[in-house]
Each structure stands twice: as structure tokens, then as C-alpha cells.
Amino acid sequence: MSRPVVPLVPRSSVAVLGQDPALATAPTAPGGPDAGARATGEAGRAARGVVWLAANGVVVKTAQTVVLLSLAAMLAPSALGLVALGTLVANVAVQVSGLGTASALVYWRGDVLRAARTAATISVGCAAAISAALWVGAPWLASALGAADGGAAVIRGLTVVLPCTALAGVSYELLRRELRFLRRVIPDAVAAVVGAVVAIALVVQGSGVMALVAGQVVQAVLALLLAWCVHPPVLPGWDAEDARGLLSYGGPFAGTHLLELVQLNIDYVVVSAVLGTVALGQYSLAFRLAFMPYLMIVVVVTGAAFPYLCRVRGPELGRAVVSVTTVTTTLVAPLCLGIALASDHLVVLGEKWSPAVPAAAWLAAYAALLSIGLLVQTAVNAAGRPVLALGLRLAHLVLLVGALLVVVDRGITVVAAAQAAVAAVVAALALGLARRTVSGFSLRDLAVALRPAALSALALAAAVLLVRALLGDLVPSPATLALLAVTGLAAYAGPLWLLDRHRLLAAAALLRRSQ
């Protein structure tokens, strides 16, 4: 069972990207009156990129949800197990293939088109090798994971298109580097909808779980073709020194995302093995609910902010990181706090979900703290230090595994609390690291910038608790949940507007400003 994860250099004899003199001094914008306007314009394009990426996420996730609901309605639960298995294997393969060289293009400082050809060669070559290995090893892998009956076909079907995905990724990252987010999301959104239509049509005709596989194949091929329509195709090529630079940055970058994938799934494995499938189901519901603000806001914002931060140099980078962190935290805080305060409404789905209530509250805190870690990792990557981001992710995974092994037998609430505690430690480590490695980043400035959101969050909590006290023995229902949501958001928005109106107006101006 997987969760979304959430998807450079001129010639030099120095292989480590961060040590290349040509990279240490990145191209700067020309001075004069146009420099400030150019920087503001890029910030505006990044801000609009958040909107486009968010819209794309809604389209893609809706299409995936419709397909899964169709499969659930027409197929046995075991079929969905095969889907989960195949998706997990495919997600891991995607993270490994290409070794992060496509993402490294966003940071590249030299001839990016030449480097893109080398990245295409590495990405397609690795993807083809992994796809071939999985094709041969699929029966063994499916048997080892307990899905011998049909699992091999699903794994093969979902990974045979890895070369298409890898090649499309090169075009995607070039578009992200150029802050051309609308063109970036068109192939994803259109391909996801077409793939969903194909999958649903085939499952209705009785194709079973392979309908999803066929839909994914159509989606991957169409996404590649559409990527070539919105951006000139990148033909494979080779430059040895470009390859060294791409791998020196992209390797740790890819490793960080692979560790993230493991980190976001290891709790499921441990809970299932120790507490059983019923506890896993309750924990899974709580996690998915609490994880939504992180997935729909933090992942989207960092995806758009990263190419913008890569263009900022010197102390301005730290100040930009403070701004991005402040805006993102301001958006996430009321949602996470609201989930924690209204988690008892899970019992609307039935009393069988009551054990998930306290777990959801702790996991909401976990999602908020996890957001800080991802924002800092994005800043560190933009500063050209992907190895440090990899170290943060590795530290999180090690601490989490140790904590889970100690507390898992005490139930899902303690597991959720352990998640929050580990995320708090990693967030503190990440902020300390950013203070030392990101030029211009100030914890004091960040604390001052977050003061309006913190005070607004206190107002939200007070308003929700007051309403609950006035209602007495609150009976969870959709109506009471809506009342608490409206009251809380109003209580949050009012003080925020009074205390931080200038920042809100500036963000709106960025969205309106022409490119």
C-alpha cells in the first residue's frame, strides 16, 4: 500500500556539483531597474504554478479515485490488493530509474539542453534496465510478497512503461525549470483522464484488474506524446562530465525521495504485522485524513517553489525560504488543527472507527511538523546541498523505525503519537540545518513572520472549543462538523486578515501579475 509522494553544470573536472566553481557562482540577473521586476515576475510565475499544480492534482487524484472505486465495486478485495502491490513496486521503480538526473536539470547551471540529452540517456537506460529486470523477476517478487496469483502480470504491466515515464520526466523538469507550469500540467491531466476512461471501460467489459494496467499503459504513452507537444522532444545524447554533475546532484535527490517512500509506508507494514488488519484499517483511515493537508498543499507548494528558489542567490534565498515557509504553514495550520479538534467525527462512519479518533489528532500534528521538514529539504536542495536533504530523510526513517519497534504493541494511538514526536525532532534538526546552510535564513525572522498564523490558530482553537462547550454533549454528525468548520475558519481568517493583511494582498498580487 503506497502513498503519494509525493515527483545543473557546465563542463568541469570537478564531479561534486556543490564544489564546482562554475556552479558556486550561479548566473545572476543584470542590475538596474529591471532586476527587481524580473525577480518579482518569477515569484509571480511560481505562485501561479502553485495554482496550476493544485488544479492538476485535483484532476489526477479524482481520476485515480474514480478508477479505484470502479474496481472496488466490480472486483473482489483481493484484486485491489494486487493493485496496491503493483503500485508500490512501480512507485519504487520510478524513484530509482533515472537516478534523479531529470530533477537535477531544475538546478543546472550550464548548458541545460546539452545536459538534458545526457539526462535522457541515463533516465531511459536505467528505466529500461529496471523494467527488464522486473519483467524477469516479477513471478519471484509477486510470490515473495504473497501475491503469486496474478501479481506478476500486474507488476509487469505497470512497470513496462517505465522508459516512457522517464523520458517524459525530462521534458516535465525542463518546463518546471522554466516556470511554465501550465504546459507542465497539461500532459498529466489529459493523460490521467484518458487513462481513467480506458480503465473503467475495460473493467465494465470484464477485463478485471488488468483494466487498470491497460489504463496506466495508455496514460504513460499519452503523457509522453503530449509532453513532446508542449515541449520540443529531448533526444538522447552523452557528455561524460555532464553525467557526473547530474549524478552528483540527482543521486542524493532521488535517494531522498526513495527514503520518503519507505518512510511513508513503513508504519503500515509494522502496524499490520503486529496489530493486525483491523488496526491497520483504522490507522490507515486516520492517516489518510490527516495527511491530506500535507499532500494537497505542502507537496504542491514545494513543487512550484523549488525552481523559483533555485534562481535566488545569496541572502535573498534565505528570505525567500522564510516567505515560502510562512505562506505554506499559514495555509496548512488551520486544516491540521481543525482535523485534530474534530477528529471525533470519524464515528459518523460507524463506531468501529472510534479507535482512530485519538490517532487522527496525533497524526494531524504529525502532518504539520512533517511540512516543516519538507520545506527545509526543498530549501537545502535549492542551495545545492542535496546530500544534506538525503541525510535528513535518512535520520527521519531511522528514528521512526526505532520508535515504531518500541511502541507499536501499545496500539495505534501511541504509534501516531510516536510519528508526531519523531517529526518534531526532525523538524528541529531541519530548521537548525537551514540556519547553518541556507544563506540569509533566520529563525527569528521566521518566528516573527509566523506570529499572525500562530495567534489566528489560537483563535480557531478557542472558537471551536467554545462552540463545543455551548453545544454540551456534542453528537457527531455532518451538520455539527460543518458548524465547527465554518466557525473555526472564520475565527482563523479574521485575526489573520487584521494581523497579516499585507502578506495576503502581496500573494494575491503575485497571482494577478502578468508574466
Image (spheres, rainbow, N blue to C red):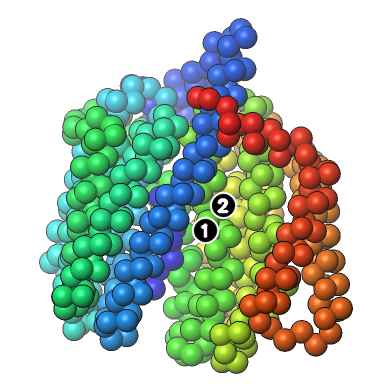
Image quarter in which the N terminus is found: bottom left
Amino acid type shown at disc 1 = Leu
Q: Please rate how many residues cluster around mark 1, counting C-alpha atoms within 10 Å: few if below 14, some from 14 to 19, many from 20.
A: some
- Residue shown at the point (63%, 48%) measured from the top left: 328
Task: Judge from the rendering whether residue 492 lies leftward or rightward of residue 116; answer left or right.
Answer: right
Q: Quadrant of residue 503?
A: top right
The residue sitting at the front extreme is 479
Reading the image, the residue beneath label 2 is: 298
Disc 2 element: helix
Asked whether the viewer can see residue 15, the reply is yes
Task: Judge from the rendering whether residue 213 lies leftward or rightward of residue 417; answer left or right.
Answer: left
- Label 1 to label 2, Cα distance in Å? 6 Å
- Closer to the camera, 324 or 496? 496
Circle 1/circle 2 CB separation < 8 Å: yes
- Residue shown at the point (68%, 71%) measured from the top left: 482
- 211 in relation to 440, above or below: below
Q: Position of residue 185 (x, y in %)?
A: 38, 43
Q: Position of residue 297 (x, y in %)?
A: 56, 53
Q: In which quarter of the image is residue 347?
A: bottom right
Amino acid type shown at disc 2 = Val
Reading the image, the residue beneath label 1 is: 295
- 11 in relation to 290, above or below: above
- Closer to the camera, 75 or 444? 75
Q: Position of residue 192 (x, y in %)?
A: 31, 55
Task: Judge from the rendering whether residue 54 lies leftward or rightward of residue 223; answer left or right.
Answer: right
